[in-house]
Image (cartoon, grey):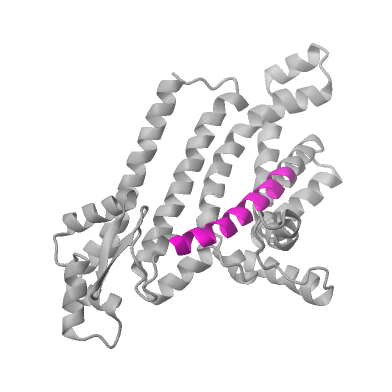
């Protein structure tokens, strides 16, 4: 098991390095292949009213006139040990992890990003808890009541959840519970450390809106898995041994069904932290998704690269955790 963990951690680090190289090449190598010069890239740092002297100084200080592999090495080195930047006469140290400075605001990217990570993480965690509980529970009940009204109603709701886009359900929830029936006066983010109750209350509507979409998928996946698992020979053996039905369903049936659920959950949760753009936009939450959309509009490459790498880290880390949890969920899984 220890050897497997070491291999998976090493593989995750290599994958993150590959992602950083590909991302860097897309934003810095591909434009050069398309004809963009180092001067044009430096101009984005200086602004519209730039003079040739300031553009040349930025190009030299930021290393845009260096070969692309040297620029990439400086970028990776900045992530681990920081980097020194010189905008004008004064030098500035960017502490590790250094993702550079914003083209538009000239503000260090990482501190701005860390202010938004708790928002996206809180949104993802709360929604994930809701969609797991309701999705898996609904799927199990539907499988055990196959063909009955509760099964048909549950699958109809699940189909509606999969079909309706998040910007529609989010707006409906906004209209009903904020404007029509003002139960919630605001969905502004409140830090968990400041007031846990207000944190949960203000995020409840975004959680429900996001969870409605995902719980539908998990309900259908759980139902399909339970229908297949409950017809296996070992389930009949467990019942023949006189075990209680609840034990047969939860310990023998659901436990085997959870393996694909955990797999897709790792992907969904990791992706959601960096890409919950529509939910953050509908409820005016200043998370990573909204931050990245604004950066794309402004063509702010350092921010876009930072968000890409952070999102990739969460995806890789989530899948690593999923792989390690497999053995605990399903005893049939063994690592060599």
Left or right, 224 with reference to 182: left
Q: Quadrant of the C terminus?
A: top left
Q: Above or below — where is 177 with respect to 270?
A: below
Task: Give the residues in magenta.
Answer: 111-133
Left or right, 336 with reference to 92: right
Q: Above or below — where is 265 with respect to 204?
A: above
Q: Above or below — where is 13 with respect to 158?
A: above
Q: Is residue 121 inside the magenta stretch?
A: yes
Q: Position of residue 230 (x, y in %)?
A: 72, 27
Q: Above or below — where is 324 with respect to 149?
A: above
Q: Is residue 126 inside the magenta stretch?
A: yes
The outermost residue toward the front is 90
The foreground one among 208 and 99 is 99
Left or right, 283 with reference to 322: right
The foreground one among 230 and 286 is 286
Left or right, 59 with reference to 115: left
The image quarter containing residue 331 is top right
Magenta span main SS: helix
**Residue at 41% in and 71% down:** 296
Q: Position of residue 43 (x, y in %)?
A: 25, 78
Residue 165 visible in rendering: no
The outermost residue toward the bottom is 49
Q: Position of residue 130 (x, y in %)?
A: 71, 49
**Residue at 53% in and 35% down:** 322
Query: For the image shown, how many numbered marks are present on the structure?
Result: 0
Q: Position of residue 228 (x, y in %)?
A: 67, 31
């Amino acid at each position: 098991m220890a050897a497997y963990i070491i291999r998976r951690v090493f593989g995750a680090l290599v994958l993150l390095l590959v992602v950083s190289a590909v991302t860097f090449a897309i934003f810095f190598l591909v434009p050069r292949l398309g004809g963009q010069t180092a001067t044009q890239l430096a101009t984005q740092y200086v602004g519209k009213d730039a003079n040739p002297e300031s553009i040349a100084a930025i190009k030299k200080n930021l290393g845009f006139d260096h070969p692309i592999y040297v620029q990439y090495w400086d970028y990776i080195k900045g992530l681990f040990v920081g980097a020194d930047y010189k905008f004008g006469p004064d030098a500035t140290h960017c502490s590790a992890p250094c993702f550079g400075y914003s083209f538009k605001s000239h503000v260090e990217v990482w501190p701005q990003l860390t202010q938004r990570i708790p928002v996206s993480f809180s949104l993802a965690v709360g929604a994930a808890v809701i969609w797991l509980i309701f999705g898996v529970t609904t799927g199990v009940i539907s499988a055990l009541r196959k063909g009955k009204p509760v099964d048909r109603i549950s699958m109809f709701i699940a189909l509606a959840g999969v079909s309706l886009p998040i910007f529609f359900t989010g707006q409906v929830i906004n209209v009903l519970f904020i404007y029509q029936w003002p139960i919630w006066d605001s969905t502004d983010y409140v830090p968990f450390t400041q007031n846990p109750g207000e944190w949960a209350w203000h995020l409840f509507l975004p959680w429900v809106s996001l969870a409605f979409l995902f719980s539908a998928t998990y309900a259908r996946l759980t139902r399909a898995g339970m229908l297949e698992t409950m017809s296996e020979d070992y389930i009949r053996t467990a019942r023949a041994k006189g075990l209680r039905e609840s034990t047969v369903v939860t310990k023998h049936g659901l436990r085997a069904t959870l393996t694909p659920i955990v797999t897709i959950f790792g992907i969904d949760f990791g992706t959601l932290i960096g890409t919950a753009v529509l939910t953050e936009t509908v409820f005016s939450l200043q998370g990573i998704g909204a931050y990245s959309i604004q950066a794309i509009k402004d063509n702010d490459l350092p921010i876009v690269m930072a968000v890409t790498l952070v999102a990739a880290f969460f995806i890789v880390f989530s899948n690593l955790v999923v792989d390690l949890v497999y053995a605990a969920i399903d005893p049939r899984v063994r690592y060599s």
